[in-house]
Image (cartoon, rainbow, N blue to C red):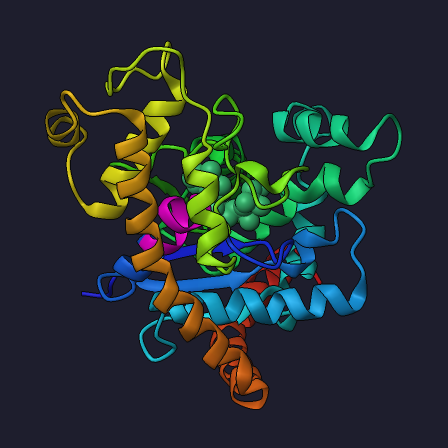
């Protein structure tokens, strides 16, 4: 039987992925590439929903791809590509936007959060409609599953609604995608503000573990992570969000259970936990940073990998778009 298809993407909006990107997305992508027919992309069309400097965007797109390869994505075992290399995303995006109600799009809460950050009236129409482009991203590949974090659930719902709407109006064309929930892919929080998710587009880098940063800088950030005035190392996201975040990171990265860690740190202090976690992060990401730099050193080879991935993706995307155009009367 054919393997179920998965589709996921990451934005080239920073010079490094964060530990949140790694534990919440990238690591799972690597784990899924054999059991699924996997399509992974660097979503540069989504990145331009906020203004980008062209040279920076081009560099960050390569840096994102290099990190995905360094994390273990194998272009022989998945399709790894750049969204703008496949023009069908924008083409199907238009069709999908004509199928979406204005009120329906207005209910997307991410726009409210993200546009608030830009100041009144400053947000682009692209930022408003980006969930619809995301729908096109998913439906183009007839994806069965989409690994999504909690923050993206509403957009997956929109994908399901629009797939069903199109199928109902024009005949069965699209696979209706399901969320793929990874067990312990809870959100990784900002080290300085454990009420907010760790995001590569955060205003301040103080609370971010950036995978390509100097390991010493990351170790220092972990040692200065916000905790609380108690002494006990215990998982309690409500009253101890900082310590709980450190435990969660440690458990995910060290493949240990949180209960096991709580046990190990009975009678020890926050300083011990931070020191050990800093070491684990250094051990894990020093070789990752080296591998990324190796992929970046050969730009020709990196671009060739992405061109090949784009061809693989386009073969599927063009087929879906042709069927869509036929059905709507083009
Ligand atoms: P960012 O918010 O860092 O710019 P993206 O929007 O590019 O990240 O999302 C890339 C992937 O990383 C998505 O699957 C998203 O759910 C995941 N992700 C981002 N931040 C976190 C986090 N703090 N914890 C867990 N997963 C995250
Ligand atoms: Na994001």
Ligand 2 quadrant in view: top right
The residue located at (39%, 19%) in the rendering is: 241
Q: In this view, does 171 lie to the left or right of 279?
A: right
Which quadrant would residue 327 be assigned to in this image? bottom right
In this view of the protein, can residue 87 be seen by the observer? no
The residue located at (33%, 11%) in the rendering is: 230
Answer yes or no: is residue 103 visible.
yes
**119, 130: nearer the viewer:** 119
Give the camera-side residue of 185 and 312. 185
On screen, residue 58 above or below 98: below
Picture coordinates of residue 146 (x, y %)? 40, 47
Whether 77 is drawn above or below 176: the answer is: below
Q: Quadrant of residue 299?
A: bottom right
Q: Residue most toward the right? A: 121
Q: Is 20 covered by the magenta stretch?
A: yes
| Residue 169 falls left or right of residue 74 | right
How many numbered markers are drawn?
A: 0
For the point 64% across and 62% down, the residue is 325
Q: Is residue 3 above or below residue 229?
A: below
- Where's the N terminus, which quadrant? bottom left
- Secondary structure mainly formed by the magenta segment: helix
x, y percent for residue 277: 30, 42
Residue 165 percent coordinates (x, y): 54, 38
* 315 lies left or right of 325: left
Quadrant the C terminus occupies = bottom right
Position above or below: 164 against 11: above
State the image quarter where residue 184 is shown.
Answer: top left
The answer to whether residue 31 is magenta is no
Q: Position of residue 267 (x, y in %)?
A: 15, 20
Magenta span covers which residues? 18-27
């Amino acid at each position: 039987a054919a393997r179920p298809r998965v589709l996921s993407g990451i934005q080239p909006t920073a010079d490094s992925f964060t530990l949140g990107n790694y534990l919440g997305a990238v690591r799972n992508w690597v784990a899924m590439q054999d059991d699924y027919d996997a399509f992974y992309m660097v979503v540069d069309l989504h990145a331009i929903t906020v203004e980008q400097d062209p040279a920076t965007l081009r560099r960050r797109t390569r840096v994102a791809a290099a990190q995905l390869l360094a994390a273990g994505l194998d272009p022989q075992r998945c399709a790894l590509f750049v969204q703008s290399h496949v023009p069908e995303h924008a083409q199907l995006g238009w069709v999908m936007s004509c199928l979406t109600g204005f009120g329906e799009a207005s209910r997307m809460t991410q726009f409210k959060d993200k546009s608030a950050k830009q100041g009144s009236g400053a947000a682009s129409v692209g930022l408003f409609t980006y969930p619809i482009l995301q729908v096109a991203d998913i439906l183009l590949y007839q994806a069965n599953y989409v690994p999504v974090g909690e923050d993206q659930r509403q957009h997956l719902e929109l994908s399901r609604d629009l797939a069903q709407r199109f199928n109902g109006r024009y005949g069965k064309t699209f696979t209706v995608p399901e969320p793929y929930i990874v067990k312990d892919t809870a959100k990784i929080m900002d080290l300085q503000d454990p009420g907010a998710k760790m995001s590569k587009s955060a205003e301040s880098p103080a609370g971010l573990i950036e995978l390509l940063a100097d390991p010493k800088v990351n170790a220092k950030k972990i040692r200065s992570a916000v905790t609380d005035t108690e002494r006990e190392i215990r998982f309690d996201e409500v009253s101890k969000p900082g310590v709980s975040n450190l435990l969660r990171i440690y458990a995910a990265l060290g493949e240990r259970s949180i209960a096991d860690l709580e046990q190990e740190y009975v009678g020890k202090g926050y300083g011990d936990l931070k020191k050990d976690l800093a070491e684990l992060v250094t051990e894990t990401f020093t070789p990752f940073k080296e591998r990324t730099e190796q992929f970046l050193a050969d730009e020709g080879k990196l671009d060739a990998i992405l061109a090949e991935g784009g061809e693989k993706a386009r073969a599927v995307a063009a087929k879906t778009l042709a069927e869509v155009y036929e059905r709507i009367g083009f």
